[in-house]
């Protein structure tokens, strides 16, 4: 799969943003280590999801492109598929929950996708998506359980390792596992000695439980502010990849996540959504043991946060 990742790097060369790598001298002093943030909040649509969506959709056959595509997502994958569909002239339908962040819903519609809303309490998104697929013949663009999507997401870590050599640890958020598994494969291909650690909210720790028990665990509708991690479980593709390439899984509390979002904004002057702040949350909460003089890479997955949610989080710091 490492060769697929290298192909994805080439495929995305003229389309994805080469996002910046930032650091904070204040944070480095606090932790006694060098921390490097790969800022996918500066990616197209404000999240890493553009990478996987483009890598996958651009490889569809002409017949598949003519029929149209469909996806289900609470936000970032929805926006990514909608934008790529617009860029490539493909009819796009997105199935979104009624509790999706308003900013992500508005952006998805703004890219020209047809949005179908479902009730998370009474309806199952896969069932709705399947019925639409069957009726119109659309191709499903999976949010994470697809090798082309995973290879695209992996390019974020690939770029980070090229920019910063000798990383001792790489931290990545985990929802469905597409970003984490891809980043782990890229990391082991470029720097085998680098430890890869997945980070989840404690309220949505299905991947951590799955990793520790070796059995796929599901948590329906987990209650976490990190909406990008509210997936029910890892996928049939991502779970074995995470078992093989990831070294450890750690969890953080809702309070840890809020503190990390606040630090990113107030100290680093960047807007990061709760899911994107999981890596920093793990560092600030001491969930991960750090040796002095380590070089730690952290994937910030995105920056799409509703203004009202951000205001509430900032008020908590006062």
Image (cartoon, grey):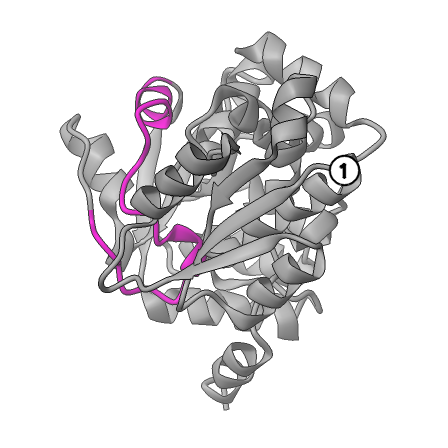
Please indicate whether residue 61 sits to the left or right of residue 227 in the image.
right
Q: Which residues are magenta?
A: 219-244
Q: How many marks?
A: 1
Q: Residue at x 36, y 71 (%)?
A: 255
| Residue lying at the far top of the rendered structure | 3
The secondary structure making up most of the magenta span is: loop
Q: Looking at the image, which residue is at 51% across and 17% down?
A: 188
Where on the picture, by quarter, is residue 257? bottom left
Indicate the position of residue 138 as horizontal and vertical percent values.
Answer: 52, 33
Along the line of sight, the residue nearer the viewer: 83 or 168: 83
For label 1, count other residues whose C-alpha is less than 10 Å away and answer few (under 14), some (14-19) or many (20+): few
Observer able to see residue 63: yes
Instruction: Give the residue pinned by disc 1.
Output: 89
The x, y position of residue 265, in whole percent, is 64, 71
Residue 118 location, quadrant? bottom left
Identify which residue, 291 or 8, lies in the foreground: 8
The percent coordinates of residue 174 (x first, y second) are 41, 43
Is 225 rendered above or below residue 289? below
Is residue 156 highlighted in magenta?
Answer: no
State whether residue 17 appears in this view: no
User: Is 239 contained in the magenta span?
Assistant: yes
What residue is at 70 percent from the left and 61 percent from the top? 110
Taking 183 as reference, is 166 left or right?
right
Extreme residue in the right direction? 14
Task: Reply above or below: 189 against 272.
Answer: above
Among the 4 quarters of the image, the one containing residue 264: bottom right
Q: Where residue 90 appears, x then y in whole percent?
A: 70, 37
Above or below, 255 against 235 in this view is: below
Element type at mark 1: loop
């Amino acid at each position: 799969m490492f060769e697929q990742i290298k192909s994805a790097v080439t495929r995305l060369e003229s389309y994805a943003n080469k996002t910046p790598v930032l650091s904070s001298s204040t944070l480095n002093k606090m932790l006694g280590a060098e921390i490097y943030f790969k800022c996918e909040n500066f990616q197209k649509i404000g999240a890493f999801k553009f990478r996987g969506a483009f890598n996958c959709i651009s490889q569809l056959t002409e017949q598949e492109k003519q029929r149209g595509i469909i996806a289900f997502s609470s936000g970032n994958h929805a926006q990514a598929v909608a934008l790529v569909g617009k860029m490539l002239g493909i009819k796009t339908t997105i199935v979104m929950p009624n509790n999706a962040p308003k900013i992500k819903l508005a952006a998805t519609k703004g890219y020209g996708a047809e949005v179908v809303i479902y009730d998370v309490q009474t309806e199952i998104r896969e069932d709705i998506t399947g019925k639409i697929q069957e009726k119109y013949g659309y191709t499903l663009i999976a949010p994470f359980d697809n090798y082309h999507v995973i290879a695209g997401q992996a390019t974020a870590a690939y770029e980070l390792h090229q920019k910063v050599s000798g990383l001792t640890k790489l931290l990545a958020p985990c929802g469905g596992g597409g970003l984490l598994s891809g980043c782990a494969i890229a990391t082991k291909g470029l720097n085998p000695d680098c430890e890869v650690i997945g980070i989840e909210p404690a309220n949505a720790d299905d991947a951590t439980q799955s990793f520790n028990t070796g059995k796929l665990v599901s948590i329906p509708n987990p209650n976490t502010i990190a909406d990008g991690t509210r997936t029910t479980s890892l996928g049939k593709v991502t779970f074995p990849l995470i078992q093989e390439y990831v070294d450890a899984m750690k969890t953080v509390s809702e309070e840890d996540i809020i503190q990390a979002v606040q630090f990113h904004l107030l100290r680093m002057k960047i807007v990061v959504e709760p899911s994107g702040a999981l890596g920093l949350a793990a560092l600030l909460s001491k969930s991960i043991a750090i040796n002095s003089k380590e070089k730690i890479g952290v994937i910030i997955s995105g920056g799409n946060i509703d203004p009202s949610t951000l205001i509430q989080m900032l008020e908590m710091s006062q």
